[in-house]
Each structure stands twice: as C-alpha cells, then as structure tokens.
Image (cartoon, helix red, strand yellow):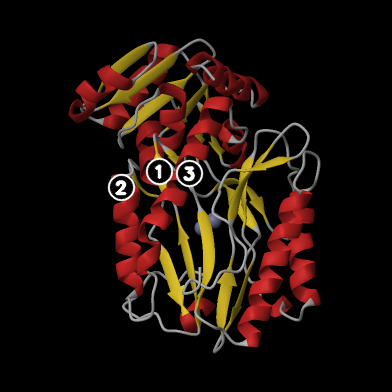
Amino acid sequence: MTVSQRRQKAVNLLSDLELDVLILCNAENVRYLCGFSGSSGVLLVTPDQLVFLTDSRYTTQSNEEVSADCVIEYKIQADGVADQLLSLGVSRIGFESDLAFGVVKGFQAKGDPNWLWLHLKDELHTLRLYKTADEISLLASAADMNVAGLSEIEEMIRPGVRENEIALELEFALRKLGAEEKAFDIIVASGLRGALPHGIASDKLLAEGELVTIDFGCRLAGYHSDETVTLAIGEINNELRKIFDTVLAAHDQALAAVAPGIALIELDRIARDHIKSCGYGDYFGHGLGHGVGMEVHEAPTLSPRSKAVAEEGMVFTIEPGIYVPGVGGVRIEDMVLVTADSQKTLTKIPKMFRNILLN
Ligand code: ZN
Ligand code: ZN
C-alpha cells in the first residue's frame, strides 16, 4: 500500500467523524502514515495536508524518513502544534486517547477557545486493522525469524538450564538474524511456573518431567511476530499431557474456524467450550487472541466480549491456554491472517506435542 493509500484511509476517517484535522502522536500511527520511526513527533492530518512536527533532535531523521506536505520543527510542542492548527484554519479537532491530558491541555490553551476537541479511541483502531500485502509480508518475515531463532537455541532447552538464559539466547539469536528488537520480554515458564500466564523468564532451572512454555516474537521494520510453543522436557505425567492435548485441540479447532464473516466472539467460544468440556474451564482466564501489526497487541481483540467479525486482511493470534496452580500450564499461539475465503497461518513452528529430549 502506498503512502497515499494510507493517507486516504485517514482522510476517510476525518469525513466519517466530521472532523477537520486529526492530531496523531502514537508512534505507530505516525510511522504508518508518514514513515517517521522516531519517538517524538506529531502528525496533523487534514483532507488535503499532512503536516509533520518534531523537535531539532529529529530533524535529520525526519528529512530522511518523512513523507508529508511539510515538516515543521518546533521548540515548544504546544506552540508548534497550535500555530499549525491556526494556520490550517481548522476548528473540529480529533486527538488520540493515549495523548497525555497535560499535552492536550497545552494545545487547547494555545488555540482558539471555540475549537471543538474530540477524544478518539476505538475510532482510530480501524486505521491499521486491515493489513495490506506489504504489511503481511513483513509480518510473515518476522514470523519466519521465530522459526530460525528457536531452532538456533533449541539444543539448550535441557534440564539444568535457567529460564532466563533461554530468553537471553533467544533474543540474541533473533537480533543476529536481523530483527530490530524482541517484540516483548520473552516468557519462559517451566514446571509449576507454567501456571503463570505471563511468567517472564526467571532464574528457575528447567527440570526433566516438566513442560516449558516459551512465548516470544520480534520486530522487523516496525512489524511484530508473536508465537508460543509449549515443549515437554522428557516424560511428563498424564495430567500435564491431558492439559497439553486439550489446549492443542482448542487451538486447532479455533484456527480451523477462522474465515471471513465469523464473529471473533465465536472463535473465542470454540476454544473456550472445548477447554470447558475437558474440565479446565476455570483455568483459561484470558481472551483467545489479539491483533498483531505495528503494535504487538492491537485491534481486534478475541474474547468473550468481542463485537467484531473476522474480515479479510486482519491478522490476529489464536492463543488458548490452561494454567493450573500447583500443576503447571500450557499455551499454544499462532498468528493468523484472514484471507478472502479462509485463513493463512503466518507463524510456522509446528505446535504438535514434542518431547524435546527425544526429537
Ligand atoms: Zn505471545
Ligand atoms: Zn499474543
């Protein structure tokens, strides 16, 4: 998708919301619309102008990266933005909900008291909801790095190794493969720690007879991967195996149901019903998945409260889990693209049961 097509999406949003201008500060939205990859910039979008503002620290970078009608350098952000709003002659202004209250107050104090300010939240989610071919190929490449990264460190997943050594080596492998950054703090949760859905790697040693859950991903040219594998370290007991098989079946069933037109709440229900039917309903406490793109967690959300429907171009995760305190846990996660008639799984690490000491 070209910059002008992305810009058109934002312009359509302006007319849908009956606004004159959008003030964007969210780094991902700014990068999406004008290419700036730095952390401090403001983008003003009107039906016929894209105005990028930043301070002198980013002048060189913005000259190299930014595609906009004009680039303005400010000394004080509130002054720079208010001056531009005045010169654009706008009066109905939409701004992002993650803009700090004090920042918005600053813009308002410098502007015209008659301007109307609209606080935007879910409205902006649609901007990056449908991925285009170039975005999908970056997401797929980031997912391919997961395959290579994990295989690079797989031999060290053995009894006696610390969880955080695995996390560190995995991050290092992903960076060496060309990732810009890990997508989030890598989760390595083994044995009883597997019951912590977000168990950041600790200094616990892996032990034979345990499951280990590794939830990881990376960022490539601004786009993320997110994937979870659960591996057995040697022989595991029957209960852990039953938990694994239950999560895998829930994952497979939900994944197979992904297609344009299915309600996201229904995908969540498919996985949740299977887990309930196996007696673990109380141990799946989070939603089934989330969108992935320039942010590792973005719209849409798959949960018992989802309202949206799967549509072509959406990319989201399917990640059921069971977490039983005192026993352990399993999560299995893939990233899936909704295609014109079904789905394509972007993450490629096989998710079947594996005893890492045997194969
Ligand atoms: Zn994950
Ligand atoms: Zn996830």
Q: Is residue 260 visible?
A: yes
Q: Where is residue 29 in the image (x, y as percent from the top left)?
A: 46, 33
Mark 2 lies on residue: 175
Q: Position of residue 12 (x, y in %)?
A: 63, 20
Q: What residue type is labelled 2?
A: Arg
Task: Tell me: 21 left or right of 122.
Answer: left
Q: Position of residue 297 (x, y in %)?
A: 52, 50
> Residue 103, relative to residue 172: is it above or below?
above
Q: How far apart are marks 2 and 1 (CA)?
A: 9 Å
Q: Do the residues labelled 2 and 3 touch (CB within 8 Å)?
A: no
> Residue 324, relative to residue 82: is it above or below?
below
Q: Is residue 117 visible?
A: no
Disc ID at residue 144: 3
Mark 1 lies on residue: 219
* Nearer to us in this view, 301 or 85: 301
**In the rendered image, which quarter is residue 150 located in?**
bottom left
Task: Nearest to the eye among marks 3 and 1: give it.
Answer: 3
Answer few, some or many: residues within 10 Å of disc 1's Cα (few below 14, many 20 plus, some between 14 and 19). many
Tell me what residue is drawn at x 47 percent, y 50 percent: 147
Q: Which amino acid does label 1 sit on?
A: Arg
Task: Nearest to the eye among marks 2 and 1: give it.
Answer: 2
Q: Is mark 1 on a helix, strand or loop?
A: strand
Tell me what residue is drawn at x 75 percent, y 55 percent: 267
Q: What residue type is labelled 3?
A: Asp
Q: What element carries label 3?
A: helix
